[in-house]
Amino acid sequence: MNIHIVNNTHIEYLAQKFFPDDQVVRDGDVLNVGPLAPNLDDYRSARKQFFDEYYLSPLPDTAFWSAEFARTMPEVRRICFWLTNSLNDQLAASLWATRLRSLGIAGTDVDVVIAGSTTNALRSASLCQDLLPDWVLARRPLSSNEWAALQEWWVAITNPTPNMFLRLLSIQTPNGVVPFRDSLRILLGRYPDSRTGLSDWEELLLRHIASKQDSSITAPRLMGEVVCRLSDRIDQPGDLTLMQVLLRMDQVATSFPLVQSFERDWPFRRTKFSLTALGRAVLQGQENYLAYRPIDRWVGGVHLDSSEGRVWVREGDGLVLWPSLAPA
């Protein structure tokens, strides 16, 4: 038996099309948002709780975590990871390697297919071509170093402090080696900026609103324009994720809003958003949002929690503790 493990529907379609006799398993989690537990026994329960609270929907079921999947491992001949260069796929590959090793799979049994960008994979799926794309033909075995590195990265990403993650980021690796270090570096953007207190997604949304002539925009237009702008980036949040980020900055969620929502309806088809005075000041670096609103956010295994004094912020190419700005 051969198994292909994928993380999005476009690549799932391609794997099923070109390898109809093999089993294709889609994981489908959004690993670049929310907590990641190091212990695999706790991992799924933590993700389920996060989905229930953040997305108000259940965590998608997947065969990858089923007991049946574990029972088939002795029958497996080859396993193939299908990856893009996205942050989400690099995180997923680290998780897959860790899970498979716990099931007795050796790195010598695992191949990798690298699609390049998510846009490239989508283009290949949309063309419905009959010939294998060149990037699928470039399928290769994972090296022993890559297999070990994937598991080491998972330990670093799920660690309760960012020290190990920063250390691995500082190690130079050749291009094309899995996992892609430049993709994983994007995870630093989830931490608040030391000057503004904003994450990369928060700043992106505020800047897009500020760019409008009347400094206001409807929610559907805002989500559509921002998602389109991010279509070729390594980090591609969906509109639902971005909407949750936006709603946590408005007057309904906090006494110190950065955006004002008005004409509010459900599901936000006519709702408009504009910047508040505080939002403009924070965006310009005149105020730091952390001074106004406590933070309670997960970045992988790191729990940013103002109440416990455990808040790391981006400073240059690294992270420092807030508010003392002691090196992490």
Image (cartoon, rainbow, N blue to C red):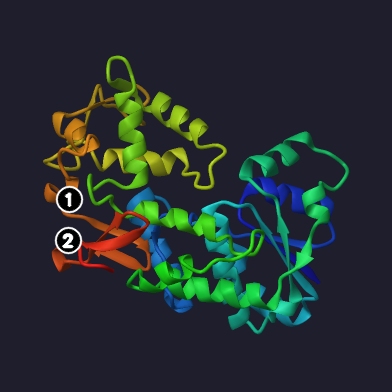
> Can I make out residue 25 in this image?
yes
Compared to 308, does 285 lie above or below? Answer: above
In-image side of 290 versus 82 (left or right): left
Number of marks: 2
Question: Mark on residue 243?
Answer: none
Q: Residue at x 44, y 68 (%)?
A: 157
Q: Quadrant of residue 246?
A: top left
Q: Quadrant of the C terminus?
A: bottom left
Classify mark 1: residues with Cα within 10 Å, few (<14), some (14-19) or many (20+): many
Q: Residue at x 12, y 47 (%)?
A: 292
Question: Quick one: SS at disc 1?
Answer: helix
Compared to 2, does 253 lie above or below? Answer: above
Q: Give the camera-side residue of 193 and 53.
A: 193
User: What amino acid is at disc 1?
Assistant: Leu
Q: Position of residue 109 (x, y in %)?
A: 75, 76
Measure the alpha-carbon separation of dots 2 and 1: 9 Å
Question: Quick one: SS at disc 2?
Answer: helix
Q: Residue at x 25, y 21 (%)?
A: 263
User: What amino acid is at disc 2?
Assistant: Ser
Q: Position of residue 12 (x, y in %)?
A: 69, 51
Compared to 112, does 159 lie above or below? Answer: below
> Can I make out residue 45 in this image?
no
**Residue bearing the label numbered 2:** 306
Question: Mark on residue 290?
Answer: 1
Q: Give the camera-side residue of 104 and 152.
A: 152
Classify mark 2: residues with Cα within 10 Å, few (<14), some (14-19) or many (20+): some
Q: Position of residue 319 (x, y in %)?
A: 31, 61
In-image side of 197 versus 186 (left or right): left
Determine contact: label 2, label 1, CB under 8 Å.
Answer: yes
Between discs 2 and 1, the one toward the N terminus: 1
Q: Quadrant of the N terminus?
A: bottom right
Q: Position of residue 18 (x, y in %)?
A: 83, 52
